[in-house]
Amino acid sequence: MKIKIINPNTTWSMTRTIEQAARKAVSDDVKIEAVSPTMGPVSIESHSDEALAAVGVMDEVSKGEVDGCDGYVLACFGDPGLHAAQELAQEPVVGIAQAAFHVATLVGRSFAIVTTLGRTLGRAQDLVDEYGFTRQCVAYRACEVPVLGLDEHPDAAYTSLLAECRATLEQCDADSIVLGCAGMAGMCERLEDELHVPVIDGVAAAAALVEGLVRIGARTSKRREFANPGAKEMVGLLSGFSRP
Amino acid sequence: MKIKIINPNTTWSMTRTIEQAARKAVSDDVKIEAVSPTMGPVSIESHSDEALAAVGVMDEVSKGEVDGCDGYVLACFGDPGLHAAQELAQEPVVGIAQAAFHVATLVGRSFAIVTTLGRTLGRAQDLVDEYGFTRQCVAYRACEVPVLGLDEHPDAAYTSLLAECRATLEQCDADSIVLGCAGMAGMCERLEDELHVPVIDGVAAAAALVEGLVRIGARTSKRREFANPGAKEMVGLLSGFSRP
Amino acid sequence: MKIKIINPNTTWSMTRTIEQAARKAVSDDVKIEAVSPTMGPVSIESHSDEALAAVGVMDEVSKGEVDGCDGYVLACFGDPGLHAAQELAQEPVVGIAQAAFHVATLVGRSFAIVTTLGRTLGRAQDLVDEYGFTRQCVAYRACEVPVLGLDEHPDAAYTSLLAECRATLEQCDADSIVLGCAGMAGMCERLEDELHVPVIDGVAAAAALVEGLVRIGARTSKRREFANPGAKEMVGLLSGFSRP
Amino acid sequence: MKIKIINPNTTWSMTRTIEQAARKAVSDDVKIEAVSPTMGPVSIESHSDEALAAVGVMDEVSKGEVDGCDGYVLACFGDPGLHAAQELAQEPVVGIAQAAFHVATLVGRSFAIVTTLGRTLGRAQDLVDEYGFTRQCVAYRACEVPVLGLDEHPDAAYTSLLAECRATLEQCDADSIVLGCAGMAGMCERLEDELHVPVIDGVAAAAALVEGLVRIGARTSKRREFANPGAKEMVGLLSGFSRP
Amino acid sequence: MKIKIINPNTTWSMTRTIEQAARKAVSDDVKIEAVSPTMGPVSIESHSDEALAAVGVMDEVSKGEVDGCDGYVLACFGDPGLHAAQELAQEPVVGIAQAAFHVATLVGRSFAIVTTLGRTLGRAQDLVDEYGFTRQCVAYRACEVPVLGLDEHPDAAYTSLLAECRATLEQCDADSIVLGCAGMAGMCERLEDELHVPVIDGVAAAAALVEGLVRIGARTSKRREFANPGAKEMVGLLSGFSRP
Amino acid sequence: MKIKIINPNTTWSMTRTIEQAARKAVSDDVKIEAVSPTMGPVSIESHSDEALAAVGVMDEVSKGEVDGCDGYVLACFGDPGLHAAQELAQEPVVGIAQAAFHVATLVGRSFAIVTTLGRTLGRAQDLVDEYGFTRQCVAYRACEVPVLGLDEHPDAAYTSLLAECRATLEQCDADSIVLGCAGMAGMCERLEDELHVPVIDGVAAAAALVEGLVRIGARTSKRREFANPGAKEMVGLLSGFSRP
């Protein structure tokens, strides 16, 4: 089984962190392939970044289909391009926000999201609501560390993140913490050790879910909405995305 | 006052239809400028098409800001790139699905959506739910005419659309019909004459709403989520979208 | 185009303030006619006041239909008599709470209501929920200034209102403030200048929306619920409201 | 214990039917006093009728407070003026739609409403949603018999009502039927005998609930929203409703 | 009329308190019979306790059917075994959480739950949501007194409970307080005297509701879900629960 | 890794079917141990059966904790005793309804449940709502084959089930089918081959999810609601469940 992990931003050092988290989350017989797209934002911190990142995600999924991948993880907490990816792939695709919410609701009644920048919490709320977890998500929090700050100043970032998690748990009854950025994957274990509640990294969650889906043969329904999109001409800069 | 109407697909004949519908919807002192992006899909009929169309929308909004536009309409029923556009523009941006739902709920308790292809109804449902109109939207219907079919075979398309609208009204108590594609703008009046309920074209609705928002000085809140996104490097094919 | 603005309370000084706010919100070719009913409460601060005010609203809408008005604004934040008015009028009717919520959700994800007396917030909540904006309204606040206090002691009222708005923004992430009383219309611009987020006055919002609806020919659906009510005898004090 | 049953319409023959239904629903030591207001519509079949009926309801509740009533039933399925009545009375007030929904959800998971005219179902839906029973109400149906038709042509009306109830049960899984008009009170038992599911008459339901509330001393909270409204001047036709 | 009050825990001193509260809540011609099961937990403070208590509840309902009871109250705030009891009984069954929520929403817009141990609030939330009162329940609070502490140290327990109620009312706008344990029944009146808002004891509420349901002949629908379960063999320890 | 599969009914032939489905769903290095409790119903088809089955589930989970199991699957579609099991186990516990809904929402927007007896659909609805999938579950269907009929007359049962699935897909737009009984596990693959949409067996889904949870170290939060319940005395028949 080969699972492709797509880090939708183009910062490969983060892709490496993500790869390690995914590898630990799956059985020994699963091959993990982690990539960044060849195009798009170096980090994703706004709706504009999300929209541009989705293009690269589509590109990587299309390549993965040629390569015979068995499933895909989209490793950005905004799940950019998820629905498009589900159309393009025959095999299951799971976003890390989606995966983290599913796991959180399997281990408790309620969870709190702790993310990087507060401005991205609107997107998190849209995803929570779309996936059905409105009632279970009891807090939306941000430590206000930029995404690349996790990579560049990991100690300071960890300190801020831990403080925000602690404050969150003091102020609400969440059963668990969902980390709101793929770049936090490497900090998950330490946080859990200090906080004594489940701390959920979406990268590990998504990799484990995709392995499970593949093992039971659960693939995206092609009945209607997620059927492969038909032929379509694209023009200008995006003409390479034309579907013959 | 200058309102820029962005048809997210690249089929200019459709852009002309849209322009006419918008012009009729506003006061004489409002200037309407209707464009298609230089890049992207010739029609939008899937999540993949939506994702690619969002890029062109962002490009046109950015140009509009330089040109001093006072407001923007996104004239595709999936409202592609709406949140990104709200970040990039200082002035109000309204999508035609959004506008149509707002108008429908001002003229009745309930509405039904009648669109082109059934596979796009998932996106419509996500928008209805996100905007808050879950309870008011009582039917999701499709006449299964492709988007470009509206342009190329208007008579056959009209016949199919009318039949689907009639069936919808017979099978549910909707107070009004919301047309699910900008390409149906030119058929709205005829449909209303035959159906004897309000038939709402999102293009006209959005143009009228943007004029109103501009007149009362209501602009997108820049407090947090929709603040202008900061500097960001984009790589590869999308490097032209880097924000300095 | 003639839009009738009905201030459901019988305090004409407030009606004049409302008229000015409405006039600024519409195109030059729109005629604004602002009135108070000949019957009912001098201010509206309870469910009892709302119920009595609805009678006068119905009376003014019926007169407006004879006069050939093109649309109506109900300028009290409880939208008293809105559904009755929609039955009685052929042309669009918009309440200012309704209008303010619609505009608030076009300029941001979330809004907070700041009103006069806390006891009226139950009504505000019912309207938010009925119109579909449960998720978007993130705070219900009151400055505890009575309605006529806005008119009689405007400076003290403004100070209290500003303080409540500031406290609201500090304590929640609302993208905008919705003012919860027509009598606050004249304070909107100053508040926005000080608060740096959109502050929405329902009077301006409603006037602009009604102009838009009229321009695109969107009238209340007469399919079922809002069809003109048939003949009906009324007895006693209300016999003048009999419908022949 | 004295419970006042207010039939919000002014047709006293219907008030007598309602009185009988209420009397059967309470203990022997409860005194039932059934009245129609001195003003308002002869039957209630539209939002306009509801709004006018609320005035008479308020009048009768105010008189009841002077008379020392222990509780009130509002015997029209639109619960007109309920919130105003809760402000004006120290003692509990229950509407028959409200009561019917409460009883229906105590005897099963789901219920269907079968009412007189389809145009009143919008009001029913608003009440269902406001009271919290959105999930439990699985069908909204009308037999299209006018309210006074129940009184004037009871046999024909019964036949239509029974047919509509049967069709409802065939087409959905409702555990019970809620009758959507006080004028149907006298038909409840026969319908239940024929349909073999609980058929709930709101008049009996409300009378029983009010008796229970009085017995356990449960009165409307006067903490905030339903506190007695303060002094207020009313003008014109409604000056008699001024509160000193 | 004979109403059987089942205290699902096996502490008979608590059963006596519950009996007194129920007796005060009904008419003189109603006979109250209060029991504890012969099996199960001495107090109910976890999901595990709830699950075990449900068995004894079923046993007592089955005995009650043989004895010709007219209705049942389940006097534990988790309503353990309610749906099973509704299947087994021909006559109405009401849980005290259910009853308290119904009464609270008849006397105000909103309520707060104040219970014993915080760990039981998850169950309370599930019940609130299932019964339809999500919007109305605005606070979930616990005084952290164990259930048997109410019985063994009533003064200390009362002090803690009163303090928690006061804090709750200061921190939210609840119209009333719902007591979250049958063991608090004896403290209800004193609390109401001190707090000046309705304080609702589910035991009294349920007894009054069952009397009302019996009086109007409202019995559990046997149409589908709550039909008497057919024959079934049980094995091992539970073989006595086999249904022939 | 050892996963214990608890079939809450006491029919061991069904337990064997379940065991096979679970074994296929996990990696080779996972040990599957499938059991039925020593007590309880031979099949689960009512709320009463569910309540009694929960006792045996608790017993088996407690034994599993002594045996050092790494995770648990509750293999009955009503997820009986799930919350109690989560309290008693340190390791993850997943119910098959829960698992099936999670998997269905990972492979499509919407799903339909097709179960055995219609009377169990109320329980299914409660679970769907509690877990957050109200919007995604678009149909509740039953083939009216009793649970043991799946085991005793598999060919006839399959024919009925297939027909009901086909009718469901014709009448709604569900992206996938969720099978509503563990006893259908052996029919899943054949159904999927004939229906051309994902058909989800909760046993396989739950086994795969538990393996994933164990692999990423995600255990039930012990923060509050699901903390191990403290000491408690049980009396009578259930005294063996006392917690020292």
Image (cartoon, coloured by chain):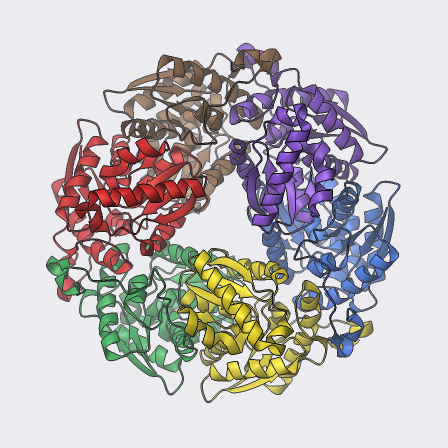
Chain colours: A yellow, B blue, C purple, D brown, E red, F green
How many numbered callouts?
0
Q: State the residue in front, D87 or C72.
A: D87
Q: Can residue D96 be seen in this snapshot?
A: yes
Residue C94 vs residue A201, the one in the foreground: A201
The image shows residue F107 at horizontal and vertical percentages of 52, 70
Say which quarter of the image contains residue E45.
bottom left
Q: Position of residue D63 (x, y in %)?
A: 42, 13
Image x and y of residue E143, in percent: 31, 49
Using the rendered image of the protein, determine whether residue C219 is visible from the camera's viewpoint.
no
Height in image: A132 above or below E77?
below
Identity of the residue drawn at 27% across and 50% down:
E145
Left or right of residue E184, residue F212 in this image: right
- On screen, A80 above or below D158? below
- Residue A231 lies in quadrant: bottom right
Question: Quadrant location of the C terminus of chain F?
Answer: bottom left
**Vertical arrangement, residue F236 with respect to residue B219, above or below:** below
Image-based side of F77 in relation to F36, left or right: right
Viewer-proximal residue among D200 and D131: D131
